Amino acid sequence: MGVWTVLQERQAMLLDPAIRDWVLLPIMLVMVLVGVVRHHVTVLLNGPPKKADLKSARETKGLQRGAVLRAHGNHLPEHAFEARKAYLTEAFEKGTYLKDPKAGNKPKANVMQDPAYVETMMDGMKKNMMNIIPQTVIMGWINFFFSGFVLIKLPFPLTIRFKSMLQRGIETQDMDVSWVSSLSWYFLNLFGLQSVFTLILGSGHAADAMRDMQAMSTMGMGPAAGPQLSPTGQPQDMHKIFLSEKENIELTEHEWGLHNVETRLLVKYNKKPASVLLEQKHAKTHGASSSSTSPSSSSSPAAVAAAASGKKKGKRA
């Protein structure tokens, strides 16, 4: 403890109060104002919200319907599950939910000739510009005027791994990790002011830089954003996606969620022993194995002859 106290005393520094008034608070205030201006400019550039394309929404909801059936099909009775399963597999194979069912596997035309694709790319470029330009200007302003400033000290100790994140722009190896440089203060505000923007602008604001970065990676995945794009930026082959979903539905097995619900309820409240469930499960598996072997025995010549004689007697009667 003595060595740690000596190190803390050596790292004690007195900061000029002018740093707080002319560096710390101005950086935070400028970032808040830039975020508010960026929100209003983005709203003006985007214009009124676009109406969802009916065919695109139907295509997306069709895939979601298959996923919901696979995830929650156990809540349906077996006959209802099988009916939906048969309908969706047939519809996915025929391309019923596609925007252009007649296209099928035909080669796609040039995507740059698709107005929806071009409009989607232009919207992405606008958002990218409104994200990059303000942040580049603020970083240049901080590097030019406040490079090398030490602004605050965090009230808790940190490990050496945080040094590169909190002390950017300061090439000092012996400084305590809890001291924060001006450039690192910019990044802390960039990730930490989202609650302030939500309080000022409300939810769904356009001042969230991190959300725009994530939206760029999944650009065009909404029903109103035109064609759905792959991570490489090319339109996806929706017919292949529907065929893949069809195979997933075919491989899904149904297990009735309310099977033995009365017994499970009694076991839960200690009205019956838990061994009852094990016995019923064992009986169910034994019955399934015996039913799987019954077709082979019924296909023997004696069984076929008995069935034929029974039919003849029924006709005579």
Image: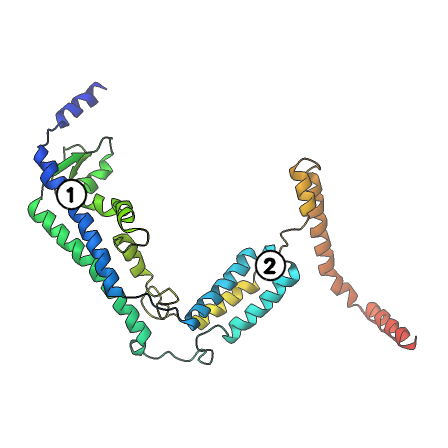
**Quarter of the image where one finds residue 83:** bottom right
Question: Which numbered disc, 2 or 1, marks the residue that appears first in the sequence?
Answer: 1
Residue at mark 1: 168
Q: Decide if residue 272 is on the left or right side of residue 130.
A: right
Residue 317, how many percent across, how many down?
92, 75
Q: Residue 216 carries which label?
A: none
Q: Mark 2 points at which residue?
A: 253
Describe the element under mark 2 as helix, strand or loop. Answer: loop
Q: Residue at x 25, y 45 (%)?
A: 193
Callout 2 touching callout 1 (CB < 8 Å): no
**Which residue is pictured at 21% across the width and 42% down the height?**
165
Q: Work out which quarter of the rendered image holds the N terminus and state it.
A: top left
Q: Report x, y in % for residue 139.
A: 14, 50
Res 79 quadrant in image = bottom right
- The image shows residue 232 at horizontal and vertical percentages of 32, 66
Query: Viewer-proximal residue, 222 or 195?
Result: 195
Q: Which amino acid does label 1 sit on?
A: Arg
